[in-house]
Image: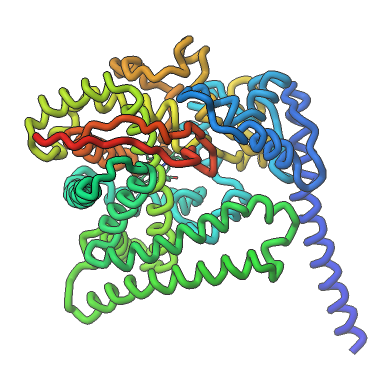
Amino acid sequence: MAFVLTAFVFIFLSWFVRVTYETLSFYWLSPRRIKKIMEKQEVRGPQPRPLIGNILDMATLVSSSTSNDMPTISHDIVARLLPHYLLWSRKYGKRYIYWNGFEPRMCLTDPDMIKELLTKYNPLSGKSWLQQQGSKNFIGNGLLMANGDAWHHQRHIVSPAFMSDKLKSYAGYVVDCTNNMLQSLGDTFESSKNEVEIGDLMTNLTADIISRIEFGSNFEKGRKIFHLLNLLQNRCAQASRHLCLPGSRFFPSKYNKDIKALKTEVEELLMEIIISRKDCVAMGRTDSYGKDLLGILMNELQNKKRDGFNLNLQLIMDEIKTFFFAGHETTALLLTWTIMLLASNPEWQEKLREEIEQVCNGETPTIDHLPKLRMLSMIINESLRLYPPATLLPRMAFEDIKLGDLLIPKGLSIWIPVLAIHHDKELWGDDANEFNPERFASKSSISSRFLPFGAGPRNCIGQTFAIMEAKIILAMLVSQFKFKISSNYRHSPVVVLTIKPKHGVQVFLEPLNR
Ligand code: HEM
């Protein structure tokens, strides 16, 4: 009996010592080690506070800089959206360290070093534990948050869904959904209201499109799932506050309970659709899981069964949620900001209308027209430069790596502030804060300083689709309506994961009865 008790106490003590050491190492020893290594290389930053690091400093600065709307439609928005970046980069140099809770993060803006990090060091860097925890409940282990071999395998599985033959079939959905939207806009005019808020309109449109692409004929159910997913995402956006306390994700708090309930509801609905398709194939009623994105993923995994993979239903759900999260809001914001820019720059709007007329000749735009719409590409690029929906790119070093003249120690997170790079006068010239699509007239202007879709092997897998979608929607809208910015529009960009117009974008639409 005494022996059993001694063994039990020994096992418990060993476990306790290990957990205590790992917790201490994670929250204290490792961050301190990183800080020392970086300080030796002259990379410094603001003093962190216990547990919360510099989170409060950043929140206070941003809350003060965004408390008022901007007096004019100016694109000089870095001081407003990243006041901490301006303050700290002036004080400590362009690469400095700040603390997100207990996680040290180095800000990196040098285009050559960024290129090296995103291309050469892809498998040796990836998404950090803190990021994964923040989004785990709404996108799980989908492609966006996967690392290492799991990422490689998933990228391989989902790539066929973005090949050019598939994009052609998605273009049909984009045209149908846009036609529906334009039709309901026409109805709005019959009730003599011609001011519309473009932000909500574009969010609904892109959500409609992605629901049809992902779920085909099950798209009504898909819309319901995505509505719940939006609620879940908004709750999870508060995660960084809740993750500062060690073990807080296990507390039975209202926050954690709400998240769990929503997640369960989303996954039950998703699983219903997946299981019914699985059953149809199993019973021999169909020989494929479908031609929509869900079907493509299930078919790919099924084909890979021979190589030892299984039809991992959780992974399928995570990818479906990831595509919705990564794909619909970003594209809606690209469209919203582009319409705001065209509505406040009527000369560019007119030039674009002429180009569309010349290329499409009154027909609905098809995928073959798109490469010929060069001015539209330039305008979209300039919009992505001034208002990049993804304002930063995050990476964590999983091993010690050498980046330019710097040794980046294992465990250091690197944050690439895309917004600041896109507005940097040293990289773009004195007119960096002006709307000037002409700068994209030559292909050489698209270089490592332009990062709306990231770079390297982990760049945005949906970028060709997103550009195709944006081009079709804009071409259809511009050829049917003239628009000008409303006096009710208040220019007030804010960052909540992505750059959003705080009060929406109100424009006057005038139908062009051609
Ligand atoms: C204007 C629209 C879009 C923008 C600005 C955008 C931006 C980005 C950026 C910057 C990344 C890289 C993130 C990183 O390196 O950490 C990314 C990755 C990703 N995007 Fe997009 N995206 C857009 C549209 C889409 C669409 C339409 C889809 C899918 C339907 C999509 C799916 C993804 C996925 C799955 C990843 C993760 C790729 C990986 O890690 O291998 N995105 N996106």
**Nearer to the camera, 492 or 429:** 492
Q: Is residue 431 above or below residue 7?
A: above
Quadrant where the image shows the N terminus: bottom right
Horizontal relation, residue 272 to residue 356: left or right? right
* Residue 370 seen in render: yes
From the top left corner, tell me how far across and down residue 198 is, in percent. Answer: 35, 42
Horizontal relation, residue 447 to residue 159: left or right? right
Q: What's the residue at 33%, 22% (across, down)? A: 345
From the top left corner, tell me how far across and down residue 105 is, in percent. Answer: 66, 36
Q: What's the residue at 24%, 40% (across, down)? A: 473
- The colour scheme is rainbow
Q: What's the residue at 34%, 52% (across, down)? A: 204
From the top left corner, tell me how far across and down residue 36 is, in percent. Answer: 79, 32
Q: Is residue 111 above or below residue 491?
A: above
Q: Is residue 101 above or below residue 444?
A: below
**Nearer to the camera, 224 or 286:** 224
From the top left corner, tell me how far across and down residue 246 is, in percent. Answer: 75, 57
**Nearer to the camera, 120 or 423:** 423
Quadrant where the image shows the C terminus: top left
Horizontal relation, residue 269 to residue 2: left or right? left
**Nearer to the camera, 243 or 161:** 243
* Residue 456 seen in render: no
Q: Residue furthest right?
A: 2
- Ligand 1 image-quadrant field: top left
Q: Residue furthest bottom?
A: 1
Q: Residue furthest top?
A: 430
Horizontal relation, residue 123 to residue 91: left or right? left
Tally of numbered tags:
0
